[in-house]
Image (spheres, rainbow, N blue to C red):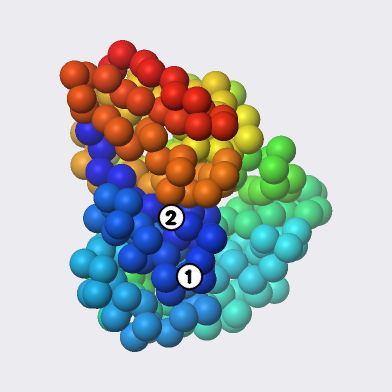
Amino acid sequence: MPKFSANLSMLFTEVPLIERFNAAKEQGFNAVEIQFPYSLSPAEIKQALDESELKLVLFNVDADDLLQGGEGLACAPKKQDQFKRAIEQTVIYAELLTPDAINVLPGRCLQQERLPEYIDTFCQNLQLARQAFSTMGISTVFEAINDIDMPGFIITTGQQMQEVLAQLQLPDLFMQYDIYHAAMMGDDAADFISKHALDIGHIQFADCPGRGQPGTGNIDFAKLFTAIDQSNYSGWVGAEYKPVGATHANLGWMQHIQGKTFVTSGIGGNLVTQVW
């Protein structure tokens, strides 16, 4: 069975971020990830990790205004100095927290005629990030985000991520493969992971549509987790979804490997059982 990490930016939001570490541990997680940890100091996060005996496996470089509908940071030609400062900030956190990987969100191009310029800027910034993080033994990852939820995003599919990897051909640079975004774009995530596991540095998941926990959408997670198990991927698999209801009440999908039965919690707490 995959090793699951809890994304504390989306799970356990019933309590403040600093309290989510213990909440994740109490629910059986041994690792966590955070989208943007910068509201807490590195020392605060380190203390919370130590007290809860958790590993931090992933966090993101700051993305400026991306979540507010802007172009973000990593691909914006006029923001390269700001991106360098964001990398410097990330390094301070990474030195103390030692994640397995750091994610660089590509961002949006809001003027499609300038897309080649934005992709070129992203590739330059990705090389800068990789150089900084590799010296600490940390992988750099980047992800595709569907252009339905985030119109104008410059990388939307696994194929486009592969093209960036082929262009740069750099060690310690990998795809972050998000199963929800892949499903929104109509991609076969199980097939992609089976074929390209060695190029994947981190996996995240949510059901689709809706981005809720497994059992709230149409994704066959029994097939998906089996594909991950049978692939060459050995990293963590991040639960990065919007819980339907309180987080602790909707973790039925973690009741697994019991008679080779995979159990997911459906909407309203109804259980859906799939043979795995």
Task: Judge left or right: residue 67 versus residue 30.
Answer: right
Residue, disc 1: 17
Residue type (three-letter) at the residue carrying disc 2: Asn
Q: Residue at x 25, y 63 (%)?
A: 55
Please state which of the two labelled residues, at mark 2 or mark 1, is closer to the viewer. Answer: 1
Q: Residue at x 38, y 33 (%)?
A: 253
Which quadrant of the figure has residue 245?
A: top right
The N terminus, quarter of image: top left
- Toward the left, the furthest residue is 259
Residue, disc 2: 7
The C terminus, quarter of image: top left
Q: Residue at x 46, y 43 (%)?
A: 249
Residue 82's place in the image compared with 228, above or below, is: below
Q: Nearer the viewer, residue 180 or 239?
A: 239
Residue type (three-letter) at the residue carrying disc 1: Leu
**Crowding near the residue tagged with mark 2, few <14, some 14–19, many ≥20 C-alpha atoms within 10 Å:** many
Looking at the rendered structure, the secondary structure element under dot 2 is: strand
Q: Position of residue 252 (x, y in %)?
A: 39, 35
Using the rendered image of the protein, determine whether residue 2 is visible from the camera's viewpoint: yes
Q: Residue at x 35, y 57 (%)?
A: 24
Task: Judge left or right: residue 149 versus residue 96.
Answer: right
Q: Nearer the viewer, residue 80 or 196?
A: 196
Q: Position of residue 93 (x, y in %)?
A: 37, 79
Using the rendered image of the protein, determine whether residue 187 is visible from the camera's viewpoint: no
Distance Cα–Cα, label 2 vs label 1: 11 Å
Residue 39's place in the image compared with 192, above or below, is: below
